[in-house]
Image: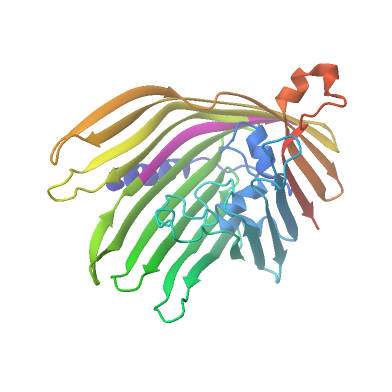
């Protein structure tokens, strides 16, 4: 499977290098997750939020501060979901340094800011869940080639030291590494590639019994190319691949035994486009995605079995119109058609499989962006509020569903 994906990646890259050169694209220092969401969770646009997935984008967003006020589940909730803050500054002719602080409800996908994304720590109920992750990132520019590296870390401890007895210690941590590359290889071709590594793990030390532990390795590969086909039209192939492997130790008396833990694989391939004319941008396209988790066999107990979901087609569509220098309107649409496949052990050697058609989130997003000087506020609009019409005035509904802020210094 991996060789097949690697072959597709190489062919995709080679096929894009033959396009003739034209004028490079302009990258604006404005946007955020609210913009991406309002345009249908769009993976086919360039946005500063891309820095959370590929650190090399920091070379294009120097002297830049961004963050999310997030969203709430109620009209006037306590605190926000998805909040984070980051800053990135130029420290030399070719170098930038940045930092991002995020929480465990961070909305980005396949980022080293995602904490315990596949639940290896969560299975240790005595460990405190990770939160407040910090990422340090840096970029270096070699002409048109931008190279980035990111390092993230979070940890927790839950320790009890009873009088006259041995301590009980439950700890968890996660280290993340990101290696990014962005380059305007020619006037017609922008390449965006990143490799991320995550190492979440947990340990549990109990008196008079063997230690318990679990550790996981998560490898994520992401690639996009923006191929300029004409003055107004760009083709945008997107490839994302994730694979995980995990193992652990379980107590066996005063000793421990090694076991294999479930593994996960994710594969996404999309082919989108960007059409831009004047102050109007439309981007979108179809994608195929698969997600599967495999649980290893247990001798004389259960066979290997897996659960998964595939989606095709997945539509991410979005439009953006700059009404004036200070205000932008957006509309997006997302729809998913797919199927689930769930295996369950029926004996120590056989499994039962159930397959069902499923439909994912479907519907519209609306958004708006305000700009003044270097300051930007981008928000998705709660369409339920719009449906209330004049009743919106003085109503209890939240007008903005999600808010992002940024400042270009």
Place residue 322 in its image quadrant: top right
- Residue drawn 39% across the image and 45% down it: 9
Does 159 appear above or below 59? below
Q: Is residue 190 left or right of residue 200?
A: right
- Residue drawn 53% across the image and 48% down it: 191
**Quadrant the N terminus occupies:** top left
Can residue 140 be seen by looking at this rendering?
A: no
Does 319 appear above or below 93? above
Q: Nearer the viewer, residue 30 or 344?
A: 344
Q: Nearer the viewer, residue 345 or 325?
A: 345
Q: Residue furthest front?
A: 164
- Residue drawn 45% across the image and 67% down it: 171
**Quadrant the C terminus occupies:** bottom right
Q: Nearer the viewer, residue 4 or 122?
A: 122
Residue 215: image location, x then y, percent: 36, 62
Can residue 350 be seen by looking at this rendering?
A: yes
Count the labels in the image: 0
- Residue drawn 67% across the image and 55% down it: 60
Magenta span: 265-282
Q: Is residue 246 left or right of residue 56?
A: left
Place residue 328 in its image quadrant: top right
Main SS type for the magenta part?
strand
Q: Is residue 126 left or right of residue 89?
A: left
Scheme of image coloration: rainbow
Residue 398: image location, x then y, percent: 76, 33
Does 99 appear above or below 183? below
Residue 281: image location, x then y, percent: 69, 31
Q: Is residue 220 magenta?
A: no
Q: Residue furthest bottom?
A: 164
């Amino acid at each position: 499977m991996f060789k097949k994906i690697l072959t597709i990646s190489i062919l995709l890259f080679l096929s894009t290098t033959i396009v003739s050169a034209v004028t490079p694209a302009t990258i604006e220092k404005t946007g955020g997750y609210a913009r991406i969401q309002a345009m249908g969770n769009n993976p086919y646009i360039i946005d500063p939020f891309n820095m959370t997935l590929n650190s090399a984008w920091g070379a294009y967003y120097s002297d830049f501060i961004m963050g999310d006020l997030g969203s709430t589940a109620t009209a006037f909730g306590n605190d926000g979901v998805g909040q984070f803050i980051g800053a990135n500054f130029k420290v030399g002719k070719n170098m930038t340094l940045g930092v991002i602080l995020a929480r465990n409800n961070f909305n980005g996908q396949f980022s080293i800011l995602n904490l315990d994304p596949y639940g290896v720590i969560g299975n240790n109920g005595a460990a405190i869940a990770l939160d407040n992750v910090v990422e340090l990132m840096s970029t270096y520019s070699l002409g048109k080639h931008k190279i980035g590296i990111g390092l993230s870390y979070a940890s927790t401890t839950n320790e009890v030291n009873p009088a006259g007895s041995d301590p009980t210690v439950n700890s968890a941590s996660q280290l993340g590494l990101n290696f990014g590359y962005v380059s305007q290889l020619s006037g017609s071709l922008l390449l965006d590639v990143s490799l991320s590594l995550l190492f979440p793990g947990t340990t549990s030390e109990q008196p008079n019994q063997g230690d318990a532990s679990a550790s996981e390795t998560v490898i994520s590969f992401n690639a996009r190319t923006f191929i300029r086909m004409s003055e107004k039209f760009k083709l945008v192939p997107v490839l994302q691949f994730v694979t995980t492997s995990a193992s652990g130790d379980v107590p066996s008396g005063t000793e421990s035994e090694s076991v294999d833990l479930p593994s996960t694989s994710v594969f996404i391939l999309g082919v989108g486009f960007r059409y831009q004319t004047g102050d109007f941008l439309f981007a979108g396209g179809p994608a195929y995605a698969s997600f599967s988790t495999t649980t290893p066999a247990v001798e004389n107990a259960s066979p290997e079995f897996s659960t998964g979901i595939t989606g095709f087609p997945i539509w991410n569509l979005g439009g953006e119109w700059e009404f004036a220098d200070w205000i932008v309107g957006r509309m997006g649409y997302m729809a998913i058609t797919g199927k689930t496949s769930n295996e369950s052990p029926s004996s120590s050697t056989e499994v039962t499989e159930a397959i069902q058609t499923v439909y994912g989130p479907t519907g519209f997003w609306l958004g708006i962006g305000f700009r003044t000087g270097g300051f930007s506020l981008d928000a998705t609009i709660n369409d339920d509020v719009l449906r209330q019409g004049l009743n919106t005035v003085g109503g209890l509904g939240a007008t903005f569903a999600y808010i992002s802020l940024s400042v270009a210094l």
